[in-house]
């Protein structure tokens, strides 16, 4: 099926040789990931799996993880401020209204508008979960920017704790902590500190997966619905939930809980109807304002390669800030998951594949590093890769170096989205 899609795409789009090569690499990596996934998947679904019993985690340990993650969040914010100060740029909180943060904060302050400038009308494409959380915290602080950053910081720290709890169901303490470290130092992790929806989405999706592992499927589905109310790609959580249902041999009537997950997105569609009179108005705005629609992930690799080559040597801001990080993050994520597919729980690998296929298939993708940031299976794969000391420290060093460079480009506003 993937080969057929690729041939049809190549026939219709007629990409450049460089674009075709990048698309072929992307498609082959995805195919290899799927092939690596087949055997563990059948073993997982065929043997069955009981609900995991929670291993006792010392409250002090979770508290230390929470505090450490909060401190890391502060360090990331201070690092951005330092870079801007050294460049002679404004270091106030208003800087954090850049990228999509401005839209989320506008929605938190004024809700969605049904009339006015087009720049405000198109904010309907941003889902309401995060703005509502910001509005709630805004009751206790003066600034919407500060409220947004507080929501992001607390959700980031909570996500670190939940990731550790989830991984301790299967892993040793050392492996789980290593995955949490990679979660914190991923090259685009500064987005967790920004007033955007990544931290909240991560917290909700981890809650969904963790509860499903514990056999608590109705609460898991509720958190899945909240994730869908925060980001539309939350619908991909149906995939790991379905895997866990099958593996735990749930009764047929238990599968009805899966219907709860899309309700979060259905409520968002109702918001579209209430504001604009069309439950799918967001799709029109995505297409007309951002040139976004559903596409194929290898097509994304092709046009981003072409754009990177066009910018090479003539437009450093777009080459280093936009096209190169976007292209590398996709190929890096696929390569890493090809390594980890045989080691990860199949429901996690299936979640990554579904999420990647949809999120990276956007027809005008500008935020691949940020989109990949919420894929917790990547942290597990990195932890497995770091089983031996040399690869582990090499991975740490690479993450820190790339993260420092990418943070600097973000602080200087080099088209980092």
Image (cartoon, rainbow, N blue to C red):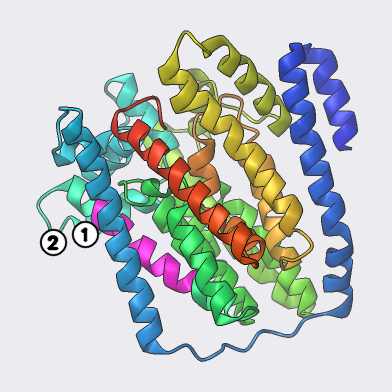
Instruction: Identify the element where label 2 is drawn.
Output: loop
Q: CA distance from mark 2 to mark 1?
A: 6 Å
Query: Which mark is drawn over residue 140?
Result: 2
In the displayed structure, would residue 350 be above or below residue 287? below
Task: Tell me the residue at 55%/77% (across/down).
Answer: 174
Task: Tell me the residue at 66%/65% (across/down).
Answer: 384
The image shows residue 401 at horizontal and vertical percentages of 45, 44
What predominant SS class does the magenta segment belong to?
A: helix
Task: Tell me the residue at 71%/45% (across/down).
Answer: 335
Q: Residues within 10 Å of mark 1 (few under 14, many from 20)?
A: some
Q: Does the magenta segment cover residue 104?
A: no
Q: Is residue 276 left or right of residue 362?
A: left
Q: Which residues are magenta?
A: 149-163
Q: Is residue 309 left or right of residue 58?
A: right
Query: Which mark is drawn over residue 276?
Result: none
The image shows residue 214 at horizontal and vertical percentages of 61, 82
The image shows residue 61 at horizontal and vertical percentages of 39, 83
Please identify the quarter of the rendering in which residue 277 is found: top left
Q: Nearer the viewer, residue 103 or 73?
A: 73
Q: Nearer the viewer, residue 5 or 32?
A: 32
The image shows residue 209 at horizontal and vertical percentages of 59, 69
Q: Is residue 91 left or right of residue 242?
A: left
Most distant residue in the left direction: 142
Query: Which mark is drawn over residue 137?
Result: 1
Q: Is residue 377 visible?
A: no
Q: Quadrant location of the N terminus?
A: top right
In the displayed structure, would residue 21 be above or below residue 131? above
- The answer to whether mark 2 and mark 1 are in CB contact below 8 A is yes
């Amino acid at each position: 099926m993937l080969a057929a899609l690729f041939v049809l795409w190549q026939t219709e789009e007629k990409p450049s040789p460089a674009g075709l090569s990048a698309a072929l690499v992307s498609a082959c990596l995805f195919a290899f990931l799927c092939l690596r996934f087949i055997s563990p998947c059948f073993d997982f679904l065929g043997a069955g799996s009981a609900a995991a019993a929670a291993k006792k985690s010392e409250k002090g340990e979770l508290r230390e993880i929470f505090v450490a993650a909060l401190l890391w969040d502060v360090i990331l914010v201070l690092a951005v401020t330092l870079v801007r100060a050294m460049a002679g740029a404004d270091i106030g909180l208003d800087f954090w209204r850049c990228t999509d943060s401005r839209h989320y904060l506008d929605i938190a302050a004024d809700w969605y508008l049904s009339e006015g400038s087009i720049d405000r009308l198109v904010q309907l494409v941003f889902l309401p979960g995060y703005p509502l959380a910001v509005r709630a915290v805004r009751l206790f602080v003066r600034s919407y920017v500060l409220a947004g950053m507080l929501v992001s910081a607390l959700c980031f720290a909570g996500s670190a704790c939940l990731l550790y709890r989830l991984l301790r169901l299967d892993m040793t303490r050392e492996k789980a902590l290593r995955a949490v470290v990679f979660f914190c130092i991923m090259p685009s992790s500064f987005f967790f500190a920004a007033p955007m929806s990544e931290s909240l989405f991560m917290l909700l999706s981890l809650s969904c997966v963790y509860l499903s592992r514990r056999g608590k499927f109705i609460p898991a589905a509720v958190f899945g619905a909240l994730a869908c109310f925060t980001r539309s790609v939350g619908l991909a959580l149906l995939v790991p939930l379905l895997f866990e249902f099958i593996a735990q041999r749930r009764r047929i009537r238990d599968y009805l809980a899966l219907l709860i997950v899309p309700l979060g997105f259905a409520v968002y569609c109702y918001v579209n109807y209430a504001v604009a009179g069309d439950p799918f108005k967001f799709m029109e705005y995505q297409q007309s304002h951002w040139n976004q629609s559903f596409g194929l992930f290898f097509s994304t690799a092709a046009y981003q390669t072409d754009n990177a080559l066009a910018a090479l040597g003539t437009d450093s801001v777009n080459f280093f800030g936009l096209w190169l990080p976007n292209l590398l993050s996709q190929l890096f994520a696929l390569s890493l998951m090809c390594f980890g597919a045989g080691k990860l729980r199949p429901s996690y690998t299936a979640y990554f594949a579904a999420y990647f296929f949809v999120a990276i298939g956007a027809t005008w993708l500008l935020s691949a590093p940020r989109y990949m940031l919420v894929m917790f299976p990547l942290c597990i794969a990195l932890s497995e890769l770091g089983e031996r000391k040399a690869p582990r420290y090499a991975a740490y060093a690479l993450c820190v170096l790339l993260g420092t460079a990418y943070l600097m480009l973000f602080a200087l506003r080099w088209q980092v989205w």
